[in-house]
Each structure stands twice: as C-alpha cells, then as structure tokens.
Image (spheres, helix red, strand yellow):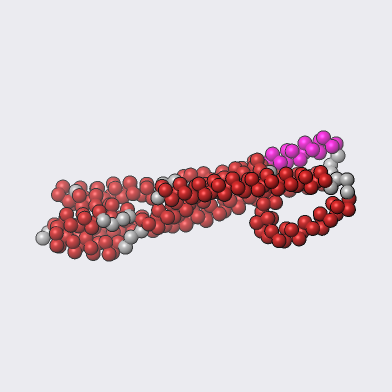
Amino acid sequence: MKKVFAILSIVAIFSFGSTLKVVAQDAAAKDQVTATTDSAVTDSTQVTEAAPAVAEEGGMHKGLKQKFIEGGAGWMAPIAFCLIVGLALCIERILYLSLSSTSTKKLLNSIDEAWDKGGVTSAMEICRNTRGPVASIFYQGLSRYDEGIDVVEKTVASYGGVQLGLLEKNLSWITLFITLSPSLGFLGTVVGMIQAFDKIQQVGDISATIVAGGMKVALLTTVFGLIVAMILQIFFNYILTLIESLTTDMEDSSISLLDIIVKHSKK
C-alpha cells in the first residue's frame, strides 16, 4: 500500500509541475501579446474578438487555467498543493479500507469448522491466511486461548483499539488540508484587497476598474480554497463511513468469536 501511495504522490507532483509550467508559459505569452499590441489598436481589437472563440475551444480546463493565472500562482499553488496531496491521502485510505473489509460470517464459519477438525491451531491458521483487521483481531485472541476466556476478551478489546488506530491513520492530515485550503484562500483575499487599496492610494482616485480588478483577483483565491475544501470533505466523509462500517463489523464479530470459543471450551 505504501508503494501505491508513493506512485500516486509522484504522479500528482509531476502533474502539478506540468500545470505550473503551462501556467508560466501562458503568462509569458500573455505579456508578449500585450507588448506587441500596445501600438496597434486594430490588432488588439482582433485579439479581443478572437479570445471568446479560443476560450470556447478550450472548455472548462482552459477557463480554470485562466482563473488560476488571474488569482496569482503565489496563492493558487499552495491551494493546488493541498488538493493534490489531500486527494492522494484520501485515495490511499479508500484503497486500504476497501482491502481491509472481509466477510466476517464466512470467516467465523471457517474458524468453527477448522476448530472442529484440528483444534485452535487450525482456527489460528485460518485467521493467519485471511487479510483484514478482523482476522488479525481473531488471531490475537485465539493465541491467548490457553490463558482463559477473560484474557482472550481483553486481548480482543486491546488489539481492536490498535486496528482502529491503523484504520484512522493519516485522517489528521486530510483534516489539516480541509482546514488549510480555505484559510489560504481567505489570506490571499485579504492580501489582494490590501494591494487593491494600495493602488487606489497611489493613483489618488477611486477607479472602478482598479477596485473591480483587485477585488476579482482577491476573491478568486477564496473560491478555489472553498472548492478544494468541499472536494476533500466529500472524500473524508466517505472514509469515515468506511471506518464506521469496519468498526461495527469488528465489534459484532468479536462477540461471535467469544461465543465460538465458549462453545468449544465446553467440549
């Protein structure tokens, strides 16, 4: 699973680097177009008329890229980083939790049948060859069978807590990115507004163009930050649902395991 997470992280980093490279190239091209069209009013009018057609051809991807440039790479890049790393962590957790789920009824029946044929050793072998936290808890409990039912029950409860901690691994980092992305957006908005007021002070007059342009750029960071937070929150809630399902399954199956142990200890 660590290899899967590493691969996803590398792909995300390369994708993010490629996006920044394209953004830089677009920004340079924009400066060149502005420099070459300052002396020709007719050419600038033609470029303005052709821009909507290019935007329509690019679709949503080009529109998002343009808004990314307008918001400023200095503030948009950290928000994009939160999205990429947060999604990588979410995907890693979803894959881990999906592979951790097992059919507990089938496992309990297999343990019961194996115990009838070969004793507790055969039942432990079934647990050893089954993946998932439930099988690991069963194995730890059966390994203490000779010490009594009370010890088995305490072992199952203690190791259940350990497995729950493994299920909740990296959730704090996902929560951090959910909180950090809108905070970075708000910070970019505040800084953008300060810069807009600085321009007004330098000009000495309140211009609608200066105020509107500065406010637009400032608010873009907040919009992107909130979008990133909402995307990560959806994945986070889905992960919590998977963990809750696995936890309930572990508790119910642990009680059934104790019933099987009590049944065979009376024979």
> Is residue 8 found left or right of 146 in the rendered image?
right
- Asked whether residue 215 is in view, the answer is no
Q: Residue at point 26% right, 56% down?
A: 129
- Residue 21, picture quadrant: top right
The stretch drawn in magenta includes residue 1 = no
Q: Could you tell me residue 48's position as x and y percent?
A: 81, 55
Q: Position of residue 81 (x, y in %)?
A: 57, 45
Query: Is 69 left, or right, of 174 in this rendering?
Result: right
Residue 54 placed where, x, y %?
Answer: 74, 58
Residue farthest left in this picture: 267
Vertical relation: 92 (above or below) 104: above
Nearer the observer, 38 or 164: 38
The image shows a total of numbered marks equal to: 0
- Tell me the quadrant of the picture where the C terminus can be found: bottom left
Q: Tell me if 168 is positioned left or right of 261 in this view.
A: right
Work out whether residue 12 or residue 181 is closer to the camera in this orientation and state it: 12
From where the camera sits, is residue 231 visible? yes
Q: Main secondary structure of the magenta part?
A: helix
Q: Which residues are magenta?
A: 190-204
Task: Tell me the residue at 88%/53% (across/down).
Answer: 42
Q: Most extreme residue toward the top, as rendered?
A: 202
Residue 228 in the image: x percent, y percent?
58, 51
Q: Quadrant of residue 113?
A: bottom left
Residue occupying the point 47% across, 53% down: 91
**192 drawn magenta:** yes
In the rendered structure, the answer to whether residue 120 lies left or right of residue 41 reads: left
